[in-house]
Image (cartoon, grey):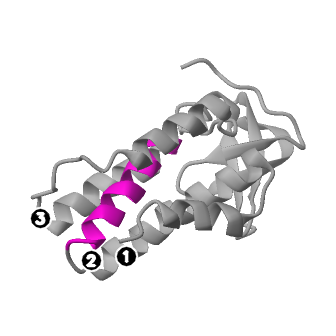
Amino acid sequence: MESQNFDVGSTAIYPAHGVADVIGLETKSVGGQAVRFYHLQVRGSGIKIIVPIDKACENGMRPLADTDEIDRMFEILRDHDVPTDRQTWNRRYRNFMEKIRTGSLHEVAEVYRDLSLLRSQKTLSHGEREMLRTARDLLIGELAVARETSESEVAEELDSMFKN
């Protein structure tokens, strides 16, 4: 994966946090080496994150999804023909957590889809409900910004895909 350069004022996606604005660039001396950092501020929560520029891509920081990536995400959500998950809830939880941590729109969409489908078959554990909410919030945040539309519109569209 090639390195992506972000400028102050640009928007990025940071894994497990969602949409973030690049609010600063800084060079610090670390162990005698000059290391450059992005300063990010997560939209919604206001959390500030400092990311070494040379590790940003490796950490999963990426640009907003483009139209093709969003179309692919909706294909993933429309695919309800996925095998029922027979893992124990804690193993399933770990696997879903790993997917959310990648920061990939498609991996997060899989978590949202799989938990939404599972919810129609059985009661989700508290942790699974929280994870479903996290995946949904990450998708809504990114899609609303990428499509320049309201979060409530995106939420309605996502939720409508799993109405029973």
Between 121 and 10, the one nearer to me in the picture: 121
Closer to the camera: disc 3 or disc 2? 2
The quadrant where residue 76 appears: top left
Badges 1 and 2: C-beta atoms under 8 Å apart? Answer: yes
* Residue tagged 2: 124
User: Any magenta on residue 104?
Assistant: yes
Marks 3/2: CA distance?
Answer: 12 Å
For label 2, the SS is: loop
Q: Earlier in the sequence, mark 3 or mark 2?
A: 3
> Which amino acid type is marked by label 1?
Arg
* Residue tagged 1: 129
Q: Earlier in the sequence, mark 3 or mark 1?
A: 3
Look at 62% across and 35% down and name the residue there. Answer: 56
Which quarter shows the N terminus?
A: top right
Image mark for residue 88: 3
Q: Which residues are magenta?
A: 103-121
